[in-house]
Amino acid sequence: MSPSYTLTNDSLTIILDGKTFSLRRGAKNYDAARKAIIEEKWDALPSILSPGLAITKWLGGGWDFVEHFITFEGEKVDQKLNDRMLAMAEDGSSPKGWMMFWERLQANPSWRSVNQLYAFLTHEGIPIDEADGHILAYKAVRRDYKDFHSGKFDNSPGVTNKMSRNKISDDPNVACHVGFHVGAIGYASTFGSSDRRIVICKVDPADVVCVPYDASAMKVRVCKYTIIGNYSGTPLPSTSFKEDADEDFQGHYDSSVEDYEESEDDDDGEEVEIRDEKVEVGSTVSPWAKFDAMSEDALLSEVLPELRAYAAHGLKITGASKIPGGKAALVERILEVRKK
């Protein structure tokens, strides 16, 4: 049965399930609602008119929508995640991957780790797996899939590496500590030697221990990860948050710090990685060397968070994250500084 509606050249009023929706030309969902009425696609109207109505078809198993807010087991989800899932439902996309992400995140025992994780997810090419809510990220390894420093830890596709969580620091001020590290492509692609191989890793949000300040939130310290394949050179889709991480993460990205890697047996008798894998001591290769050599067009093709990190830490441009005008203005400033 069709809903009651009034359609004019500039406005649309619809009564659906006892609720009245009034839209004027220029509203975000005006054209879609008008088209649905003209084509008599009545089933499409709920998701077009209200993300609150749209999200309900995805709910179940502890999920609910109460007073314009998504809840899980009676508690409101994070505001940013709430807005993201409502927007996805409004656009007709499935928010199930993010729902599973939130469920897995509730199994993370560290309040600090839970709240730090969103800064890492602002970087491009770090999607959430729609099948299970896990995070996909990158790791640089040797050509033989061993870690760079010790050469002991296998990172071949299909391998899972793990260690006891209580051995790992969740303090973001501690740059290098016990634990495994995976990161954004901007971190992985500048790590190790030029003969590196980059693999794609899957991480359960429950196993994230820390997002260190030292890499501008481009890496995470985890207690477990699984290698699912090789990086082809094309970044993974960006299904995560698109926000500025630099405000909360102003740490220095330093790949020349002396570091070491040891191993010991955990409770299961498995060998574990102890230290972050960094460039060999004495290396003069800057983590920003590839950006230094880029032309204006090449810089404009890079993602904004990594350009901001380069500007702030590679060129020491104060307030790089606050320069108005978006990517074009930032690149213009980068080129100005490089000429000096």
Image: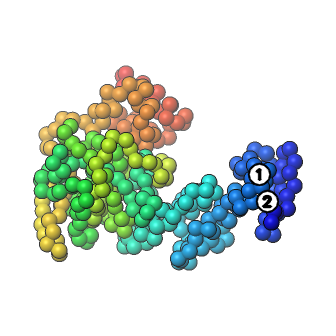
Marks 1,2: beta carbons within 8 A: no
Label 1: how many Cα within 10 Å (few below 14, some 14–19, many 20+):
few
Residue 99, percent from left and from top: 50, 66
Outermost residue to the top: 339
Residue at image point 40% right, 54% down: 120
Residue at image point 83% right, 52% down: 12
Residue at image point 39% right, 58% down: 135
Instruction: Quickly name the residue at label 2.
Output: 21
Kindly indicate the quadrant of the structure image that contains residue 255: top left
Residue 268, percent from left and from top: 17, 74
Left or right: 145 as drawn, with respect to 169: left
Tell me which numbered mark, 1 or 2, is placed earlier along the sequence.
Answer: 2
Mark 1 or 2, which is nearer the eye? 1
Residue 42, percent from left and from top: 75, 60
Instruction: Quickly name the residue at label 1.
Output: 39
Residue at image point 40% right, 51% down: 126
Label 2: how many Cα within 10 Å (few below 14, some 14–19, many 20+):
few
Residue 153, percent from left and from top: 16, 57
The amino acid at mark 2 is Phe
The amino acid at mark 1 is Glu
Q: State whether residue 192 appears in this view.
A: yes
Could you tell me which secondary element the residue under label 2 belongs to?
A: strand
- Disc 1 from disc 2: Cα separation: 18 Å
Residue placed most toward the observer, 339 or 263: 263
The quarter of the image holding the N terminus is bottom right
Residue placed most toward the observer, 79 or 18: 18
The quarter of the image holding the C terminus is top left
